[in-house]
Amino acid sequence: MMMNNTIGRAALAAGVALVLAGCGKESDAAVEKPAEGIVLGPDAVAVVQQQEIRTGPQLSGSLMAEREAQVRAQISGQVLAVYADQGQAVRAGQPLARIDATALTDAATSARTGVSSAQISLEVARRNYERAQTLNQAGAMSDRDLETARAQLSQAQAQAAGARSQQASAQKQLSNSEVRSPITGVVSVRPVGAGDIVQPGAALFTVVDPRSMRLEANVPAEQLGQLHIGSTVRFTVNGYPGRTFTGTVQRIAPAADPATRQVPVVVTIPNEGGTLVAGLFAQGRVESTVRQGILVPAAAVDERGVAPSVLRLKGGKAERVAVQLGTRDPDTEQVEVTAGLAAGDTVLVGPAIGTAPGTPVRVSAAAQP
């Protein structure tokens, strides 16, 4: 009986030893098995680069035509014809419309007749005065009669001048019946049509010169010291995604708005291709300073923690690195890193920044982002 107990205890001990040995092997296998990694596409990583950083006050505002002409009626009457429509290119002096000028034509004809009559009277008065001078010198006419002839000549000269003035005025009024463009540009507004009755001062056309535009914007007063006449402005315009335009600061208002503490600024913009149009909203930055710095995509920075950080690839694994941030550029969606990274480092971008530190990472061109 004692022998059987001894044999049972020995068998149990051997079984436990086998179990423990097996557990030890499984444990060793778990330690030696490499952790499973991830494969990322090229869009999920970015190489840190040293680039040119342009800093300065941000501004926003609306685009306006640098040269714009409001064409208004100079006479009253019915619009007989319209020669230009909205969006049509026109030259300086080109006819845009014609207003009925029947009454003005009659007035101009009458004025020309008046000039002819006054000129005849002037010639008669001049001959009478010359005859009076001759008779007076011969003693055949008194000084009083000579003075009368001189006064009649002066009166005839004044009447002739008045008639010529009336004729010029009537001719000018008649010419105003032909509405012409004062500048070369494009018709942006045309509120009238053939058959309309207009009065002096009525708006007929708006002509803008699209070759040069201006941006009327505002800058915070505390950043006024960074503005200078001639400073370069880079901006984007709604309606043209992905495109950047350049202008130059032309005017800076001498006073800030007391309510908004904003300083009005006018930026001139070359627009030779006619791409930009008035009324569009624009926002950008005045390039006050230019320097070199480390830039990374804003999507690479994780700011959910106490301090901003990025996931850097080193030795094929992701490691979390605390960084210090500088200037942000909303136009390019990049942010400056002043400490924590160096040019040439590779960082994860977008959803990939949720990768656990220590995870092996492999970048494959065939991987889906």
Image (cartoon, grey):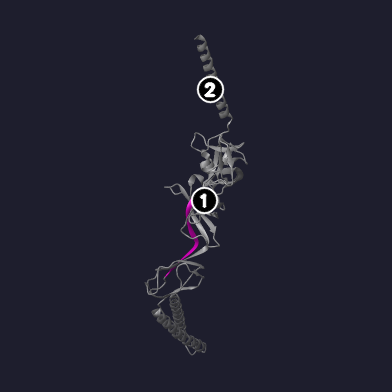
> Most extreme residue toward the front, as rendered?
1
Label 2 packing within 10 angstroms: few (<14), some (14-19), many (20+): few
Regarding mark 1 in the picture, which secondary structure is present there? strand
Label 1 packing within 10 angstroms: few (<14), some (14-19), many (20+): many
Residue 348 location, quadrant:
top right
Q: Name the residue under label 2.
A: 19
Q: Measuring from the top left, give residue 343's x and y in whole percent.
A: 62, 41
Q: Residue at x 51, y 15 (%)?
A: 8
Q: Measuring from the top left, give residue 16's x and y in whole percent.
A: 53, 19
Q: Reading the chain from its start, which is encountered first: label 2 or label 1?
A: 2
Q: Mark 1 points at which residue?
A: 284
Image position of 293 with respect to 177: above or below? above
- Nearest the viewer among 194 and 72 is 194
Q: Give the range drawn in magenta.
A: 59-72
Regarding mark 2 in the picture, which secondary structure is present there? helix
Q: Which residue is drawn at 54% across and 15% down?
A: 10
Magenta span dominant secondary structure: strand
